[in-house]
Image (cartoon, grey):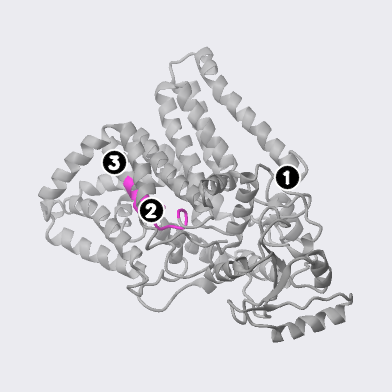
């Protein structure tokens, strides 16, 4: 879960409104003065074309530009604070991997540390596949987990550019790589949170880029790159990645049996190395599952969802009986939000509404209004033989996502390279559009990157300009204006500044929103400077266990940066413990 409707911003002008206005003005100019700036654009395109023909350099530059520009923006768009359940789960994995472990032992007080998307039994670890956690661990070793996010965003843009070179002329491939920087790397949550997206996009781009190259020459190198892409998908977005890989496998089988002139012996020899890499990866994944979840065939997600979730993922499934919950905030999330969202899709009207919402998310995140005009020519693209395979692949992925109860943009990450091919092919058709003999289509295509660059400036200065991120789901398009996550980070910084080790006991109000959870811990809980725990009827045993720590009461729903001393309680008994909880509000204000 990335953001809920409760986090939407509806007041004031939004970045989306600015983008829509810029698109309308640009379209009017292109229709009225289609030759404006044609000389300057022509010179720029010639320089751009010379660079694009140097394919390896283009791929390298796209990735470097994405990383360097984002790092240069840090004074105005600083390293983000985590706030989503999933982000803390991935950060737990990163802390574990960076410490040289693949999981952590269950803590004796684990019931006080239960939180979303984290397993405690049989081991204490993120419920997710390890791909994103590994990337964040690299960043942590470099100084901060977000550096891994920045690096993955740069690699994503390079991988997309490389993939596009296999499907389109080099100039269009470089153009697509630059659009990926402007639309995905700089401001979307793929590059501005710890949530993921870029990793799966890298895997999908490698698979689809290798596919088109294998059909031309069947080189072992391309087979190895495809194997790497499959491994990345299997450890980041396995379900959507599987949809892409199934279509690719069928396409390769058809090519090998019907189209290629290479003998079966040659094809087998060139398949041995990629197959060996895949088998090694499967063995390592089994080793990981065994040590983290207790069985080689128990996949990530399974243990956690079986323990806490009521709602299934796919629409043909039925809800499960409600398990016993120890914490109200977790019960509210799984039985109120998740289940109600799932049940709303069970009716025809709910399914159609959810499908429209999903389409809106895809359009707003990947295209916005700035890149929407070329999609008018999508019917022409559907008839292009060169991209027909990607159209089929996209249809299969879309079918799979349509039966998923939820959709967030990173679900589509394995196919983002295919989306860019379709978009750029539509741009190529739009470029030839000449109403009344005037090059209006050419002017529109040339203006699109100008709009995207202008939006970078607008988004960078959105806060001083009093611009909001817009209403959900358009808020998915980027991150940067709302101080989400800063309240918990402020309390954490305050506690870390105190001498000694601290214990933060969190008490929520009755109307607490379950998306804003504060109880997350590092991989090694006992060695952490600050330990976060939930207040329960057995808090006294927690206080005894952490007798050497300063205990604090944190109440996010009263005063997000106010904390008070938590009274030590030596006696057992639920009534006495609850009295202590009531009197804690009268403690010393810090």
Q: Which residues are magenta?
A: 178-191
Spatial CA distance of label 3 from label 1 is 44 Å
Answer with mark 2 or mark 1, whichever residue precedes in sequence.
2
Q: Nearer the viewer, mark 3 or mark 1?
A: 1
Identify the secondary structure beneath mark 2: helix
Badge 1 marks a residue whose secondary structure is: helix
From the image, tell me which residue sits under label 2: 70
Distance Cα–Cα, label 2 vs label 1? 35 Å
The x, y position of residue 99, in whole percent, is 64, 45
| The N terminus: image quadrant | bottom right
308 to the left or right of 54: right
Label 2 neighbour load within 10 Å: few <14, some 14-19, many 20+: many
Q: Residues within 10 Å of mark 1 (few under 14, many from 20)?
A: many
Give me the residue at 73% from left, 52% from top.
Answer: 124
* Front-lying residue, 407 or 84: 84
Q: Position of residue 407 (x, y in %)?
A: 54, 57
Kind of element beneath mark 3 = helix
**Residue 250 visible in the snapshot:** no
For disc 3, the neighbor class at 10 Å (few under 14, some 14 to 19, many from 20) is: many
Q: Examine the structure image and report whether residue 188 is included in the region drawn in magenta.
A: yes
Q: Are marks 2 and 3 in contact (CB under 8 Å)?
A: no
Q: Which residue is mark 1?
A: 292
437 with respect to 495 (left or right):
left
State which mark lies toward you, 2 or 1: 2
Residue 172 is marked as 3
Q: Position of residue 225 (x, y in %)?
A: 48, 30
> In which quarter of the view is residue 516 placed?
bottom right
Q: Quadrant of the C terminus?
A: bottom right
């Amino acid at each position: 879960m990335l953001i809920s409707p409760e986090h939407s911003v509806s007041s004031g002008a939004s970045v989306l409104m600015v983008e829509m206005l810029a698109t309308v003005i640009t379209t009017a100019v292109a229709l009225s003065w289609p030759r404006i700036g044609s000389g300057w654009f022509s010179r720029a395109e010639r320089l751009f074309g010379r660079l694009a023909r140097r394919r390896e350099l283009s791929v390298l530059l796209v990735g470097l530009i994405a990383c360097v520009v984002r790092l240069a923006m840090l004074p105005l768009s600083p390293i983000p604070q985590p706030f989503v359940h999933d982000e803390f789960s991935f950060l737990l994995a990163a802390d574990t991997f960076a410490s040289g472990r693949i999981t952590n032992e269950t803590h004796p007080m684990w019931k006080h540390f239960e939180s979303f998307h984290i397993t405690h039994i049989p081991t204490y670890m993120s419920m997710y596949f390890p791909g994103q956690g590994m990337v964040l661990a690299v960043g942590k070793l470099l100084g901060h987990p977000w550096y891994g996010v920045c690096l993955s965003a740069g690699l994503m843009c390079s991988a997309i550019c490389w993939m596009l070179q296999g499907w389109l002329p080099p100039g269009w491939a470089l153009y697509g790589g630059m659009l990926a920087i402007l639309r995905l790397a700089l401001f979307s949550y793929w590059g501005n949170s710890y949530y993921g997206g870029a990793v799966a996009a890298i895997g999908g781009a490698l698979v689809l880029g290798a596919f088109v190259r294998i059909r031309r020459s069947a080189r072992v190198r391309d087979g190895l790159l495809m194997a790497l892409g499959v491994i990345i998908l299997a450890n980041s977005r396995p379900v959507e990645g599987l949809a892409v890989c199934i279509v690719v496998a069928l396409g390769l089988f058809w090519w090998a049996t019907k189209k290629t002139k290479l003998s079966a012996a040659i094809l087998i020899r060139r398949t041995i190395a990629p197959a060996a890499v895949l088998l090694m990866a499967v063995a390592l994944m089994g080793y990981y599952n065994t040590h983290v979840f207790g069985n080689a065939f128990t996949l990530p997600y399974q243990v956690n969802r079986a323990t806490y979730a009521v709602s299934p993922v796919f629409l043909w499934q039925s809800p499960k009986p409600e398990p016993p919950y120890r914490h109200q905030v977790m019960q509210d999330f799984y039985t109120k939000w998740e289940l109600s969202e799932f049940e709303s899709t069970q009716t025809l009207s709910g399914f159609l509404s959810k499908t429209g919402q999903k389409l809106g998310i895809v359009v707003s995140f990947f295209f916005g209004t700035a890149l929407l005009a070329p999609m008018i020519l999508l019917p022409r693209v559907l008839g292009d033989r060169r991209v027909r395979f990607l159209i089929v692949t996209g249809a299969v992925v879309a079918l799979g996502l349509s039966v998923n109860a939820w959709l967030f943009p990173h679900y589509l990450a394995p196919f983002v390279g295919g989306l860019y091919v379709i978009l750029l092919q539509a741009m190529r058709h739009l470029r030839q559009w000449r109403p009344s003999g005037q090059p209006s289509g050419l002017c529109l295509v040339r203006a699109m990157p100008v709009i995207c660059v202008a939006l970078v400036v607008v988004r960078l200065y959105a806060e001083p300009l009093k611009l909001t991120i817009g209403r959900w789901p358009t808020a998915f398009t980027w991150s940067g204006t709302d101080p989400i996550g800063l309240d918990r980070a402020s309390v954490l910084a305050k506690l870390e500044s105190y001498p000694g080790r601290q214990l933060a006991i969190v008490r929520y109000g009755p109307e607490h929103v379950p998306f804003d959870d504060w109880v997350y811990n590092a991989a090694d809980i006992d060695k952490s400077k600050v330990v976060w725990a939930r207040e329960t009827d057995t808090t006294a045993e927690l206080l005894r266990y952490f007798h050497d720590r300063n205990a604090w009461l944190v109440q996010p729903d009263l005063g997000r940066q106010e904390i008070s001393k938590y009274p030590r309680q030596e006696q057992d008994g639920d009534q006495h413990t609850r009295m202590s909880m009531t009197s804690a509000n009268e403690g010393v204000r810090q």
